[in-house]
Amino acid sequence: SLALGASLGFSAAEKPRVIVSSDIGCTDQDDNQSMAHVLLYADTLDLEGLIASPYGPGRKRDILGTIDAYEKDFATLRTHSARYPTPAALRAITKQGAPEAAGDAGYDVPSEGSQWIIECARRPDPRRLWLLVWGGIDDVAQALHDAPDILPKLRVYWIGGPNKKWSANAYNYLEQRHRNLWIIEANSTYSGWF
């Protein structure tokens, strides 16, 4: 709604900047469904990144598989809106995040995904950067460790629940070192999708 958009910091004329971090391809199929859903609405978003993140065996190839399916419907989608991003554009913003959960410190080494978060956040764009984290929060923790200056630009929506267990070290790092991070942590409401 317009009121919700205004309360979150963007006008009706602006599309929100969004990066999705997903554990797609893991132990359940929820993120496969969610990724298809977000691509259906991609014409209403300024989609800046799709990151494959832990927990589990999910990898960048799983996001690319969803983009392959999107490509099959792309011509039809474009008849409804010329703002749908091309499959090539989506592939260009698809990145591999940390393949494993962070160690005791809550961060380890930069990943393609964490570096992409930094790059996007540092763009000269006055809008906030929304991070929709559907899996591990490790890439967010790594990005903030490596570039704490990006914190004011970020707005994080994280599906906690079991992901909190898999990303305990990254979560603890964020909670202890980045207390001013704007974050919604959903620990139970997501379960309505199962």
Image (cartoon, helix red, strand yellow):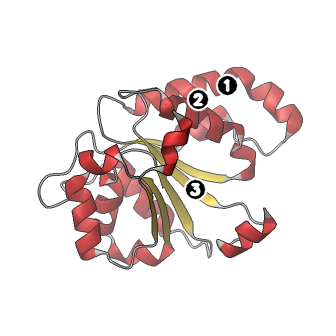
Quadrant of the snapshot with the N terminus = bottom right
Q: Amino acid at mark 3?
A: Val
Answer few, some or many: residues within 10 Å of disc 1's Cα (few below 14, many 20 plus, some between 14 and 19): some
User: 70 or 22: nearer the eye?
Assistant: 22
Secondary structure of the residue carrying numbered label 2: helix
Q: Amino acid at mark 2?
A: Ile
Alpha carbon separation for disc pair 1 and 2: 6 Å
Answer few, some or many: residues within 10 Å of disc 2's Cα (few below 14, many 20 plus, some between 14 and 19): many
Question: Circle 1 sits on which residue?
Answer: 71
- Residue 142, horizontal then vertical, whole percent: 28, 59
Precedes in sequence: disc 3 or disc 2: 3
In the rendered view, tell whether residue 155 sits above or below residue 110.
Answer: below
Precedes in sequence: disc 1 or disc 3: 3
**Of the residues tagged 1 and 3, which is closer to the observer?**
3
Alpha carbon separation for disc pair 1 and 3: 20 Å
For the residues bearing labels 3 and 2, Cβ distance under 8 angstroms:
no
- Residue 70, horizontal then vertical, whole percent: 66, 27
Secondary structure of the residue carrying numbered label 3: strand
Alpha carbon separation for disc pair 3 and 2: 17 Å
- Residue 113, horizontal then vertical, whole percent: 38, 49
For the residues bearing labels 1 and 2, Cβ distance under 8 angstroms:
yes
Question: Circle 3 sits on which residue?
Answer: 18
Image-based side of 150 in relation to 132, left or right? left
Which residue occupies the extreme left position in the image?
Answer: 104
The quarter of the displayed image where residue 175 is located: bottom left
Q: Residue at x 82, y 26 (%)?
A: 76
Image-based side of 80 in relation to 110, left or right? right
Q: Residue at x 25, y 75 (%)?
A: 177
- Residue 81, horizontal then vertical, whole percent: 84, 41
Image-based side of 179 in relation to 94, left or right? left
Question: Circle 2 sits on which residue?
Answer: 67
